[in-house]
């Protein structure tokens, strides 16, 4: 009986170790889910938007979609979530355009026709490059408002801590990717094993630009308590809006556009 139980425990332990090794080796495939399709802005009904090719380092090409602001209005520098491509953000781009705002959406490596492989280091480095490019287009730092969506909130928060900006908008943010990974895989020791960590809660304390956090009460991917914790760690001026019927990707269907519009107007006052 004891020998049989020992064999079962050894077998189960082996399975656990195999799963752990698989999670470690495949972690970036779980974090980044790119759609590599390169789509022209006009193909999804966008006018006044052009594709921009960035070369943040030798041998790497990162694509972005850019529409200049009207009448010196602010420009949204947008960092999207872990899935899809640039075309999937066309509705949001239209909203920003209709509000007279400029918008530059950066894709990550391997997304939307971009080359290379995504990682935290690569995404932050590319984002700095794109921010500097936008400055080179004559957009002043105080006229740049960073927008992070889900995974992209970790990128936006770090850039906001590194660069001067006019404001920061975070859609479904988290305290750190480590916290989200531990939430999703509670039976594995993911904290010491995660390569890309996006420690937003540490960076948010260094940002003095106006902050807007929007989150869905029904978000099952990044539960709202992560957004509230990040908000608590931030310094003023700051505002959080929780949509009672909002999930993870549908906040624009529940009033987020109005909150963003009000926030952008407050930056001009």
Image: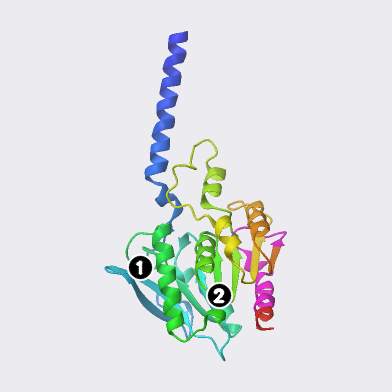
Q: Position of residue 43 (x, y in %)?
A: 43, 78
Q: How is the image coloured?
A: rainbow
Instruction: Give the mark, 1 or 2, whose residue is nearer the N terminus.
Output: 1
Q: Is residue 85 rendered to the left or right of residue 60?
A: right
Residue at 43% from the left image edge and 58% from the top image edge: 120
Secondary element at tag 2: loop
Quadrant assignment, res 7: top left
Residue at 42% from the left image edge and 21% from the top image edge: 10
Which residue position is annotated with label 1?
114
Q: Position of residue 251 (x, y in %)?
A: 64, 65
Secondary element at tag 1: loop
Judge depth for marks 1 and 2 and give the one in front.
2
Q: Residue furthest right?
A: 244
Residue 43 in view (yes/no): no
Image quadrant where one finds the C terminus: bottom right
Q: Looking at the image, which is closer to me, 27 or 229?
A: 229
Q: Looking at the image, which is closer to me, 197 or 115?
A: 197
Which residue position is annotated with label 2?
165
Q: Is residue 108 above or below residue 77?
A: above
Q: Is residue 188 rendered to the left or right of residue 235?
A: left
Q: Is residue 133 above or below residue 6?
A: below
Quadrant assignment, res 211: bottom right
Q: Position of residue 71 (x, y in %)?
A: 57, 91
Residue at 53% from the left image edge and 35% from the top image edge: 187
Q: Position of residue 101 (x, y in %)?
A: 57, 83
How far is mark 1 from mark 2, CA to CA? 26 Å
Residue at 61% from the left image edge and 71% from the top image edge: 209
Instruction: Please say if the residues under marks 1 and 2 sit with CB atoms less than 8 Å apart.
Output: no
Residue 13 in view (yes/no): yes
Magenta stretch holds residue 102: no
Q: Which residues, given as a range, are shown in magenta?
A: 242-264
Q: Residue furthest top?
A: 1
């Amino acid at each position: 009986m004891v020998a049989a139980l020992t064999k079962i425990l050894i077998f189960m332990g082996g399975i656990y170790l195999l799963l752990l090794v698989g999670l470690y080796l495949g972690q970036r495939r779980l974090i980044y889910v790119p759609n590599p399709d390169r789509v022209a802005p006009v193909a999804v009904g966008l006018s006044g938007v052009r594709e921009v090719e960035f070369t943040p380092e030798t041998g790497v090409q990162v694509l972005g979609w850019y529409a200049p602001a009207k009448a010196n209005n602010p420009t949204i520098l947008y960092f999207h979530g872990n899935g899809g491509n640039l075309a999937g953000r066309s509705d949001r781009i239209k909203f920003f355009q209709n509000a007279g705002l400029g918008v530059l959406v950066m894709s990550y490596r391997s997304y939307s026709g971009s080359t290379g492989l995504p990682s935290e280091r690569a995404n932050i480095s590319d984002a700095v490059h794109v921010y500097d490019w936008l400055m080179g287009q004559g957009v002043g730092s105080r006229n740049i408002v960073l927008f992070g969506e889900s995974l992209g909130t970790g990128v936006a928060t770090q850039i906001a801590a590194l660069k001067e900006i006019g404001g920061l908008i975070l859609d479904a943010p988290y305290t750190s990717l480590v916290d989200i990974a531990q939430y999703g895989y509670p039976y594995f020791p993911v904290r010491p094993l995660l390569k890309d960590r996006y420690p937003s809660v540490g960076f948010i304390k260094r940002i003095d630009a106006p902050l807007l956090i929007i989150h869905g009460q029904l978000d099952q991917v990044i539960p709202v308590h992560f957004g509230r914790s990040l908000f608590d760690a931030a310094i003023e001026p700051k505002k959080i809006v929780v949509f009672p019927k909002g999930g993870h990707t549908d906040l624009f269907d529940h009033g987020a556009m109005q909150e963003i519009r009000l926030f952008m107007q407050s930056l001009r006052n």
